[in-house]
Amino acid sequence: MENSLVLRRVPAELEYLSAEKSALTPLSSARALSNWSEDYREPARLSAAASGRLAQIMRLEASKDDRRVAHPAWLDGRAVPRLIVRARYNGSDVFGASRMMAQLDLAARRAGSIQRSLVLGEDLKGWPHPLRTHQGGLRLLDAQVGSLDLLMTVWGGLVTVATSAPIAVAGLIALSWDLKRGVVGAVSRWRASPLNREQAGRPSLEPPASSTAWGVKHTKELAPVLAQAVANDQGFEFFLSDGESQLKIVVLPKQSDPR
């Protein structure tokens, strides 16, 4: 396989994320994950055609010799990967809120594992196990009062994959969320749309005004849209309203970095 898919080094500005260690050490978390639960035994597959399209998007992103770091004004110019996750839980039960966060973190870790498999040219006969909890995941950036409203980015090993191919990884997180929910073949759940410029404030949870369906069965239709966004240095967003949860996975456009 071409070297164009080699994972890039983490920018120095993001080392505080990539070097961060979880409260769960490898030793303590290994026991918790030694026996794979039903969360890790998914029969669905990402087809060879779909994985090939996503790998092509990764090649396009990796071929652009530029920065994968953003300094959004709404974070006081703090350096973050261009990949941002916004999530809201409108229920009042702690179990539902914690389940949403756990499933979203699992989706991000599985997306990182899929991306690494595609980079290595492995044949995805099934969905690979997610990265372990001590290897990376989602990191809280901000939370607001009221309904549980979170703003997150990635940490650990996911910083590397998110700075190598943020749009492809964002799409994989959405697909992995559907996998966990058991609706891989569902139609018109996620909505996807390019972003032409940075929003004035933190990413909103409003659905895109104009969007395209995104899912395992939609990679053929949306792949050209993803490729065009990469070529034009645009951002991208994936939106889902899923019962009590609203999710938005955002790749900030290049203009979000004023440096």
Image (cartoon, rainbow, N blue to C red):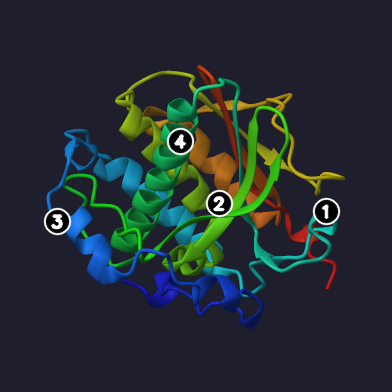
Neighbour tally class for label 1: few under 14, some 14-19, many 20 plus, Cα within 10 Å: few
Tell me the residue at 32%/58% (across/down): 131
- Asked if residue 193 can be seen in this view, the reply is yes
Q: Whole-Å distance between the Cαs marked 4 and 3? A: 22 Å
Q: Secondary structure at mark 3?
A: loop
Of tags 3 and 1, the one toward the viewer is: 3
**Residue 243, percent from left and from top:** 50, 17
Name the residue nearer the viewer: 77 or 63.
77
Label number found at residue 34 = 3
The residue identified by callout 1 is: 74
Q: Whole-Å distance between the Cαs marked 3 and 1? A: 40 Å
Neighbour tally class for label 3: few under 14, some 14-19, many 20 plus, Cα within 10 Å: few
Q: Quadrant of the C terminus?
A: bottom right
Tell me the residue at 43%/47% (across/down): 105
Compared to residue 77, the image places residue 166 above or below, namely above
* Labels 1 and 2: the sequence-earlier one: 1
Of tags 1 and 2, the one toward the viewer is: 1
**Residue 58, percent from left and from top:** 46, 59
The residue identified by callout 2 is: 167
The residue identified by callout 4 is: 98
Q: Quadrant of residue 6?
A: bottom left
- Asked if residue 121 can be seen in this view, the reply is no
